[in-house]
Image (spheres, rainbow, N blue to C red):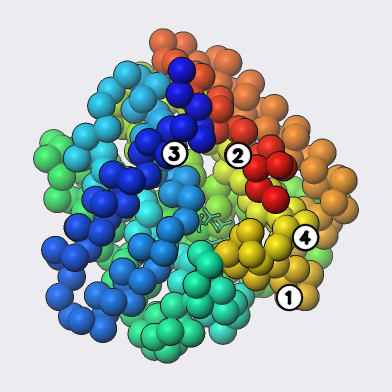
């Protein structure tokens, strides 16, 4: 029986190798290539690709080159979002994935362009698999909607606007859903599409992903308060300084932890209604939220 930790250890090396080789092969302009590779190949948990792979695994399907490329597209979009999120005009961070942020190394202009390059390359990859054309179009649509103006980008806008006001709980949940949840949901939805799951299975998985994505950003907020830069590979204790709307900020640390626990239970319940798939692996993804593993 594979669990989250083992699955990650098994899958990461070949996924990293895929990313490395695909970027090296495709990118031409030397400065841009270096800047894009710098952030994508800086490590990171690869959680969104792993979620997509886990959906395939739960349907007992192989993690083939098509899956790798689609998961790669997700990771490119995620990496772009981090480069832009760290820019001085946004969260103004100097450390990411244990390294100086992209703009610290390449300058702001090149960092913006590296992000632009990653975002657009993601859609190139989605349309250069061996999948049938209709599936490629659906994948493009899922990722565009999740990452775009009604998804992650909207969330980033609300995150910035929120710095001047205190959001209520429902608004904060919506903000976290947009800025982080949408891409996590897209990972699961793209996995479900690749696996040809039926609408009932898909609905249960999307409910799982909705709560998982929310839990993920609640945990990120909590770790900003409780963890260290050495463990996180990024600055901590920044959210309060930047007057971000966060779960610990609104509910206190204990309140945020209770909300996290409840959200994890909701994710788990969604999996229980999943018929015809092995839920064990996806269920074990909830162990990411065990505090010991993240401190
Ligand atoms: C960080 O995402 C940004 C958020 C959405 C909270 P991750 O925590 O997945 O970052 P990496 O990919 O592991 O660096
Ligand atoms: C990041 O949220 C969300 C996106 C990048 C879309 P945060 O700003 O909380 O992420 P970290 O804490 O910098 O990783
Ligand atoms: Mg941010
Ligand atoms: Mg940030
Ligand atoms: Mg954060």
Residue 8: mark: 3
Say if disc 1 is inside 8 Å of ligand 3.
no
- What residue is shown at x 58% (from left), y 64% (from top)? 233
Could you say which is closer to the camera, residue 13 or residue 46?
13
The answer to whether residue 171 is visible is no
- What residue is shown at x 87% (from left), y 53% (from top)? 252
Of marks 1 and 2, the one in the foreground: 2
In the figure, 55 relative to 165: above or below? Answer: above
- Residue 44 point in image, percent of width and height: 47, 56
Residue 288: mark: 2
Q: Circle 1 — which element?
A: loop
Of marks 4 and 3, the one in the foreground: 3
Residue 141: mark: none
Q: Earlier in the sequence, mark 1 or mark 2?
A: 1
In the image, 175: left or right of 56?
Answer: right
- Residue 202 point in image, percent of width and height: 42, 25
Residue 225: mark: 4
Q: Circle 2 — which element?
A: helix
Spatial CA span between label 3 and label 1: 33 Å
Q: Earlier in the sequence, mark 2 or mark 4?
A: 4
In the image, 16: left or right of 189?
Answer: left
């Amino acid at each position: 029986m594979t669990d989250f930790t083992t699955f990650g250890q098994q899958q990461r090396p070949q996924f990293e190798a895929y990313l490395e080789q695909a970027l090296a092969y495709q990118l031409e302009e030397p400065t841009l290539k270096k800047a894009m590779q710098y952030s994508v190949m800086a490590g990171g948990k690869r959680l969104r690709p792993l979620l997509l792979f886990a959906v395939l695994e739960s349907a007992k399907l192989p993690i083939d080159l098509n899956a790798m490329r689609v998961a790669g597209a997700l990771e490119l979009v995620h990496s772009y979002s981090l480069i832009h999120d760290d820019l001085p005009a946004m969260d103004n961070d100097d450390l990411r994935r244990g390294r100086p942020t992209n703009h610290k190394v390449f300058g702001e202009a090149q960092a913006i362009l590296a992000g632009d390059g990653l975002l657009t390359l993601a859609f190139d990859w989605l349309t250069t698999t061996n999948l049938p054309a209709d599936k490629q179009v659906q994948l493009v649509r899922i990722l565009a909607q999740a990452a775009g103006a009604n998804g992650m980008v909207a969330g980033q806008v609300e995150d910035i606007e929120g710095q001047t006001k205190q959001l209520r709980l429902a608004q904060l949940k919506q903000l976290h859903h947009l800025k982080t949840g949408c891409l996590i949901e897209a990972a699961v939805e793209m996995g479900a599409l690749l696996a040809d799951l039926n609408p009932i299975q898909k609905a249960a998985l999307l409910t799982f992903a909705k709560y998982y994505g929310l839990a993920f950003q609640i945990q990120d907020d909590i770790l900003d308060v409780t963890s260290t830069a050495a463990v996180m590979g990024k600055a901590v204790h920044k959210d309060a300084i930047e007057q971000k709307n966060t779960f610990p900020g609104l509910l206190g640390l204990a309140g945020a932890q209770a909300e996290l626990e409840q959200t994890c239970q909701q994710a788990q319940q969604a999996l229980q209604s999943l018929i015809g798939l092995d839920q064990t692996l996806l269920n074990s993804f909830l162990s990411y939220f065990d505090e010991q593993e993240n401190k």
